[in-house]
Amino acid sequence: MFLLASVTDGVDGYLARRTHQVTTLGMLLSPLADKLLVATAYVTLVYFAPTLVSGWITVLIVGREFLVTGLSSVAVQEGMTLRVRDIGKVKTVVQIISVCSVLMAHAWKWWPIGSALLPGEKIAIGSIWLMLAVSLISASAYFRAFWVEALRQSSQRRKPAPFVMQHPGDKNVRA
């Protein structure tokens, strides 16, 4: 079900962009729905597979998701464009892979691939750590892009006043 929900969400976004059906409401609600899907999955995995997904990792992931969503909402409201879509898409794919690998590792300890048996639990734990790293890198990219764009917009709105203002008739006196 998680994989199906993730795939249909991706197809929905792709079709909206391809057919030029992107709306402001969709730009705000789609990421929120994505975050709810991911948050629900990780919170459930803490209960479902606590040896594979730690509670503190889930707190970091869910916190990151909502912080970035809030930041993106502020950016949209302020007319900012945050150019970090690619890292966000990579993060989403890694999250989907990590959730699916934990679900598979919970059901099957060993994964038969050809003539080899792969350790499912180790792969799942590795995918969780990879997901955490990519998520934190992605969050820092969003916050950096927001900061850079906010500074750019701020400098365009007003130029800072000089420290010492000259008045007509003042003479430059050097100490």
Image (cartoon, rainbow, N blue to C red):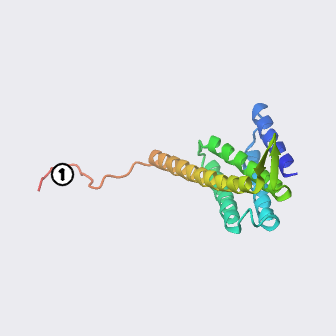
Residue at 82%, 65% in the rendered image: 48
Indicate left or right for 8 with 98 as reference: right
Q: Nearer the viewer, residue 112 or 103?
A: 112
The answer to whether one can see residue 1 in this image is: yes
The residue lying furthest to the front in this view is 115
The answer to whether one can see residue 74 in this image is: no
Residue at 60%, 43% in the rendered image: 84
Please provide percent x and percent y for residue 14.
77, 36
The residue lying furthest to the top in this view is 19
Please provide percent x and percent y for residue 29.
76, 51
Counting labels gives 1
In the image, is residue 149 above or below residue 49? Answer: above
Residue at 68%, 57% in the rendered image: 65
Please provide percent x and percent y for residue 110.
81, 53
Q: Amino acid at mark 1?
A: Asp
Q: Nearer the viewer, residue 156 or 115?
A: 115
**Residue bearing mark 1:** 170
For label 1, count other residues whose C-alpha is less than 10 Å away and answer few (under 14), some (14-19) or many (20+).
few
Please provide percent x and percent y for residue 80.
59, 46
Residue at 78%, 42% in the rendered image: 10
Q: Nearer the viewer, residue 35 or 170?
A: 35
Q: Quadrant of residue 83?
A: top right
Q: Nearer the viewer, residue 103 or 67?
A: 103
Indicate left or right for 175 with 58 as reference: left
